Image (tube, rainbow, N blue to C red):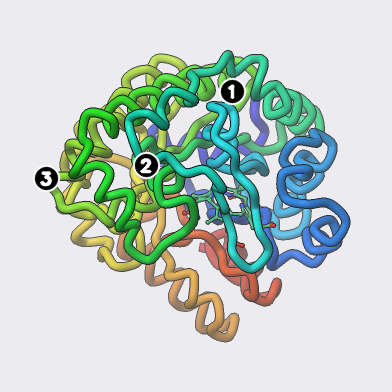
Amino acid sequence: MIKNDLFLRALKGETVDRPPVWMMRQAGRYLPDFMKLKEKYDFFTRCQTPELATEITVMPIKQIGTDAAILFSDILVIPQAMNIEVEMKNGVGPWLPNPIRTAADLNRVVVPDVADSLNYVMQAIDLTKQELNDEVPLIGFAGSPWTILCYCVQGQGSKNFDKAKEFCFTQPEAAHELLQRITDTTIAYLKLKVQHGVNAVQVFDSWGGMLSPVDYQEFSWKYIQQIVDALKPHTEVIVFGKGCWFALSDMAKSGAAALGVDWTCSARNARYLTGGNITLQGNFDPSRLFSPPATIKKMVKQMIDEFGKDKFVANLGHGILPNIPVPNAQAFVDAVKEY
Ligand code: CP3
């Protein structure tokens, strides 16, 4: 059904001629056409207007030629739908004016009807599917409950998410209540995305690496596992935990189709920790895209040699940086295609 199904075949562990390639945050600020739209419309207007979200989603497909599209949206549309205000401030990033700090704050947090409150995302999926015309698969995504909690409690980005951790460790009951409500919302949201035609889903646990291995099990993994269990009958699930190499062996037993790896974990170690059988995705250092294109190409070939061409999805180890020259992003994608 999908003309270029390399990505879906890699997720299923099938033998391929070369690995598929896409880039986390591929629809972003390094693209000049993205910046033109950013000047005209604020961030959540871009997310909430299906025509804009679709136009941005297909940009990297048309301009860079990645093997999969990821819907332009944000992980923070979930807290918004749960009645937690989220703004995107220029120069600051996510900004939540009324963060959750106590059990009483939970009184205003709802588990919404996602078909209603996140209908704009579903419209964006419908339109993007039309626009993509089954050329490449479309990835849907959500943040992990822990990563969402980080923003809900901290109120903004942070180097250590100290307030989020303090909340979990001083008010664990309230923390678990919040995590469960986020999980329930996320499961309903991702299931609806699948009904609207996304071909795989990725859970971003961007701040999982802030937790110790023991706390990770309690405050993050437990909830991601619920999401994998609920979505697995319906689609392929990818779990990306930044800094979470210590959890890879549990993740490999979870039923996820693939696991994301960041650049601090070698291919060899990631294969060892995951038992060698599950598809891995990553793990080029996003800053390495500053190297000259010839160096990028050489390093990408090395990366694929180390992971192996099968059961591998070539990607960055985290999102692409805003100031990467387009020819360098192009060199990354081309190098995989030339493998
Ligand atoms: O990958 C894609 O191209 C799809 C779109 C996507 C965005 N955010 C668009 C976006 C995805 C998958 C995300 C996920 C996301 N959002 C994560 C998890 C992945 C990761 O990078 O760790 C997180 C932690 C967020 C929260 C968030 N939203 C942050 C930290 C920021 C950056 C703030 C800044 O100013 O640097 C955003 C804003 C955001 N989301 C941008 C984009 C393209 C940049 C701001 C803009 O375009 O105005």
Name which quarter of the figure residue 334 lies in.
Answer: bottom right
When the figure is inspected, residue 312 is found, relative to residue 34, above or below; the finding is: above
From this viewpoint, is residue 301 visible? Answer: yes
Q: Which residue position is annotated with label 2?
A: 101
**Earlier-in-chain disc, 3 versus 1:** 1
Q: Quadrant of the N terminus?
A: top right
User: Assess mark 3: CB under 8 A from ligand 1?
Assistant: no
Q: Nearer the viewer, residue 191 or 284?
A: 191
Name which quarter of the figure residue 68 lies in.
Answer: top right
Q: Secondary structure at mark 1?
A: helix
**Earlier-in-chain disc, 3 versus 2:** 2
Task: Give percent across and percent down for residue 54.
Answer: 78, 39
**Which numbered marker is on residue 214?**
3
Amino acid carrying label 1: it is Lys
When the figure is inspected, residue 10 is found, relative to residue 118, above or below; the finding is: below
Amino acid carrying label 2: it is Arg
Mark 2 touching mark 1, by CB under 8 A?
A: no
**Gap between marks 2 and 1, in whole Å?**
31 Å
When the figure is inspected, residue 109 is found, relative to residue 296, above or below; the finding is: above
